Image (cartoon, rainbow, N blue to C red):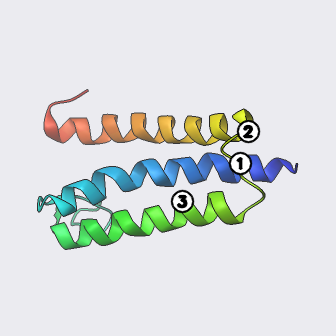
Amino acid sequence: MRWYYYVSYFFGGAFLANAVPHFVSGVSGHPFQSPFAHPPGEGLSSALVNVLWGFTNLVIGYLILARVGTFELRRWRHVIIAGVGALLMAVMLARGFGRFYGGL
């Protein structure tokens, strides 16, 4: 397998992890930070913007994992690389959003 497939799996996991807080906040009807707020990443975007942004991240994550290379859930190496990407993105999101919600 080519090395750049592993890089794409890493970023696919990161996009999937980024989809979760935006989509959940949007579906819940809560405003949340997004790149489209003013200032970007700090101001609040509407619930609709967050649903759309979360869904976009979900689609990108899917396209990366399902269409680049041959990602297989039964191959530990593939799952671990995508999981590490998701975990690192989740840690970055926790640190970034924790400033606003009393976290880290």
- Local packing at callout 1 (Cα closer than 10 Å; few below 14, some 14-19, many 20+) is few
Callout 1, which amino acid?
A: Glu
Question: Measuring 36% from the left and 42% from the top, which residue is drawn there?
Answer: 93
Front of the two marks 3 and 1: 1
Q: Is residue 67 above or below residue 94?
A: below
Q: CA distance from mark 2 to mark 1?
A: 6 Å
- Local packing at callout 3 (Cα closer than 10 Å; few below 14, some 14-19, many 20+) is many
Task: Say which element carries label 1.
Answer: loop
Pointer 2 with pointer 1, Cβ within 8 A: yes
Residue bearing the label numbered 3: 61
Residue bearing the label numbered 1: 72
Q: Is residue 83 above or below residue 14?
A: above
Q: CA distance from mark 2 to mark 3?
A: 18 Å
Task: Say which element carries label 2.
Answer: loop
Residue bearing the label numbered 2: 75
On the image, the x and y values in percent for residue 82 come to 61, 42
* Labelled disc at residue 100: none
